[in-house]
Image (tube, helix red, strand yellow):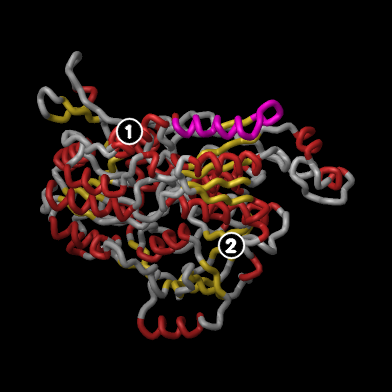
Amino acid sequence: MKSSAVKSRENIDEIIRPYHGELVNLLVKGEERAELVERANRLPSVQLSHRSLCDLELLAVGGFSPLKGFMGKADYTRVLQEMRLTNDALFPIPITLPIIDPKCVRLGEEVALRSRHNNLLAIMMVEEIFEWDAAEEAQLVLGTKDVRHPLVAEMASWGRVYVSGPLRVLDLPKHYDFVELRKTPIQVRETLETLGCRNVVAFQTRNPIHRAHEELTKRAAAQIGGTLLIHPVVGMTKPGDVDHFTRARAYKSLVERYYDSSKTLLSVFPLAMRMAGPREALWHAIIRRNYGANHFIVGRDHAGPGKDSSDRPFYGAYDAQELVQKFESEIGVEMMPFQEIVYLPDEKRYEEKHRVQTGARVATLSGTQVRDDYLSKGKSLPEWFTRPETAAILSEISRPTHQQGFCLWFTGLSGAGKSTIAEVLAILLRERGIPVTMLDGDVVRTHLSKGLGFSKEDRDTNILRIGFVAAEIVRHHGVVICAAVSPYRAARNQCRGLVGENRFIEIFVDTPLEVCEQRDIKGMYAKARRGEIKGFTGIDDPYEEPLNPEIVLNTTGCSAEKNSRQIIKQLIERGCLLDDVDERNQASV
């Protein structure tokens, strides 16, 4: 069955039509659905990643219109090179379905697409299976191959082929949270119709909305004389962001109390962000047209992932605004720039920074200040900065920095001294009353990763298993020490993403190869030199040194105890541990 399309109803024609005229609808119902469900039980299956689940949902309901499925090679190639589909429609982000094991799909045959819990979602007729180049895609779409970019690191685990073909979606991914806020494009359009304004400005966010954002969004709606669509992402955002459960609670409270319900719609959005900066901003604007918006707010460094391995921003502050503005007439969505807004305490009001008179007293708080000076210290955020309801919700999930948990990730050549230092460090932490979980690479291979070999794929799988366990420990505010060769940057940085940027501390044990060989009591290096062991890190398989680790240790002139005490000192400086004075003061409270 070919994909059907749902045209905009006549009584909502006042709202801008979807991108390229119609909303794609891939959902199958009735008898056909029942027949397909029965057939799917006899088909090979592919379990979709979280990212692919998000993409499938938005393909199914028309969020990605005019796309009618995951991209084939022709569309994919042109999107990479020109930001256009083969029908010339502007579309800056590739929407693809990666397959780790290509043996599970065959050309000309159907495959069932399932969730990680094995729930049936869709059937695809496989028309194309094509190889792709992760480095090329990263460079063209993200503008970088730096594995500190969270998507670059993630792409290393996607598999080597993409598949595409006609999709018939039987069920959308099941959600149990904030069901009343999860509106499809047609549902958003119907609600916007009832609000009665042709002009709609959409605001995307992956962060809590504070007073400056509130002021900005209200001004934007007033400027166009229309409706405000608050459309926060609840699919995948930047690793380390405030979780969507907390954010959605704050959004609901804010909209109910401080926004005009006759001119505001809150709807959460199951997008898997790519953190692709300018291209992503343009993509967001196109998607919002499908939801009924003809204006879109674009902020500074929109969809930027932060800093690269050289501690420089991945994208320029205004690159995203410039790209969206360049194409706004073609996509039919006017870009509204997010102007920096500051608080004037003497006048008790907000104003755009460029309009503030010279010499006027202003108040601002950066994200770092919010995290380090307020939330991590248990201090209430000032009311001029955020609404008290939002502050209360954020305080519920915010612990002092020294109670948040962290991961110490030791990496270096075999024989560098990782495990020895890690064992001493664990003792010093326990001496301070801190429970520690140890995840040693060799021990994990014996138990959690038993059966894995030493191919690049198996090594990455082993490291990602360690990273997954470490992330769960840190998520529950524990301390975990990981000591593994972990030779590849991409896998290490994917683990960083799993744990969270601010809670992952990479420790490079920088011991020269010749010293590691001298220490090798098992003779592994000698066997590798003789060719008896293949793929040995440092001999015939590369070790990719960290580009910007938090801590670098030298073991040739420094004992394991001295290095461990140096780590303790740095943990205190980072706020991860209390110093002796702080511990005594806390104990006396």
The residue located at (47%, 53%) in the rendering is 473
Within the magenta stretch, is there residue 333?
no
Q: Using the numbered discs, state the Cα–Cα distance from disc 1 to disc 2 in whole angstroms.
A: 55 Å
548 sits to left or right of 332: right
Q: Point out which mark residue 378 bears.
A: none
- For numbered disc 1, what is the local secondary structure? helix
- For numbered disc 2, what is the local secondary structure? strand
The residue located at (21%, 25%) in the rendering is 363
270 sits to left or right of 212: right
User: Which residue is disc 2 drawn over?
Assistant: 99
Measuring from the top left, give residue 586's x and y in whole percent. 32, 37
Q: In this view, does 470 lie above or below 49?
A: above
Q: Nearer the viewer, residue 129 or 524?
A: 524
Q: Which amino acid does label 1 sit on?
A: Asn
Q: Which of 250 and 192 is in front in this view?
A: 250
Q: Is residue 132 above or below residue 407?
A: below
413 sits to left or right of 100: right
Q: Image quadrant of residue 511?
A: top right
User: Which residue is disc 1 drawn over?
Assistant: 585
Q: Which amino acid does label 2 sit on?
A: Ile
Seen from this angle, which residue lies furthest front?
588
First to last magenta residue range: 554-572
- Whether residue 490 is visible here, answered yes or no, is yes
Quadrant containing the C terminus in the rendered view? top left
The residue located at (74%, 44%) in the rendering is 537
Measuring from the top left, give residue 146's x and y in whole percent. 56, 38
